Amino acid sequence: GEDVEQSLFLSVREGDSSVINCTYTDSSSTYLYWYKQEPGAGLQLLTYIFSNMDMKQDQRLTVLLNKKDKHLSLRIADTQTGDSAIYFCAATSNAGKSTFGDGTTLTVKP
Amino acid sequence: DGGITQSPKYLFRKEGQNVTLSCEQNLNHDAMYWYRQDPGQGLRLIYYSQIVNDFQKGDIAEGYSVSREKKESFPLTVTSAQKNPTAFYLCASSTGTSGAKFFGPGTRLTVL
């Protein structure tokens, strides 16, 4: 089955850019999502990209997709302390099966 | 306001008891899901439902049961057969199974 991998931790300084990486194994994954989870809360959809796209930008968020390498990244520009959270990558196939990574904990230092 | 709600936020259970977690959505979504989240881990799918009166087992369905009698509601029962039920439970919904999922705030279940 699909496997989605993320690095577990990332620490940046306030104002810097953060880049969170994700790799997946199923080349038929059509929909790729990024979610944010704050402590004790549910997941909040941040952004998404379809497999026929290379890049998507939404305000401070930029998603890059390298379909050949099955690599997805989320860049957060001008990272703020409020961006500290766990970020999950999720890959969904056409059949609707979703697989989540284990999450990357982003810590933003003032 | 459209959204997805879960109740209660915290739930304590004695060993051997069944408990039911509530999930309600007013987003008019067809698909609903239950996930379990353990510390430092990703989400594992327990059950999902694509339409009313139909549901399928996910990856870790043993010890859990669900019903989908109404489009808006997808309650999860954690039975005494679930050996390690202490976890954070998340309900989600989507327009279709490939669509983006909208999550509820979660229920933290602790077995005493």
Image (cartoon, coloured by chain):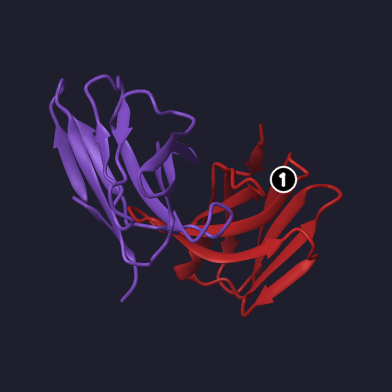
Chain colours: A red, B purple
* Residue extending furthest toward the bottom: A59
Residue B71 percent across, percent down from the top left: 33, 56
Figure quadrant of residue A52: bottom right
Residue at 68% across, 63% down: A49
Residue A56 percent across, percent down from the top left: 72, 71
Residue B31 percent across, percent down from the top left: 45, 53
Q: Is residue A100 visible?
A: no
Residue at 50% across, 67% down: A83
Q: Is residue A56 visible?
A: yes
Crowd class of label 1 (few under 14; some 14 to 19; many from 20; radius 10 Å) = many
Figure quadrant of residue B76: top left
Which residue does the numbered mark 1 point to in the structure image?
A23
In which quadrant will I find the C terminus of chain B?
top left
In which quadrant will I find the N terminus of chain B?
bottom left
Q: Amino acid at mark 1?
A: Thr
In what element is the residue under mark 1?
strand
Note whether B72 is above or below B61 in the view shown: below
Relative to B51, A10 lies left or right: right
Residue at 57% across, 56% down: A11
Note whether B49 is above or below B103 in the view shown: above
Relative to B71, B22 lies left or right: left
Question: Could you say which is closer to the camera, residue B105 or residue B70?
Answer: B70
Residue at 27% across, 44% down: B75
> What chain does mark 1 sit on?
A
* Residue extending furthest toward the right: A68
Number of marks in picture: 1
Note whether A62 is above or below A103 in the view shown: below
Residue B3 percent across, percent down from the top left: 34, 67
Relative to B12, A74 lies left or right: right
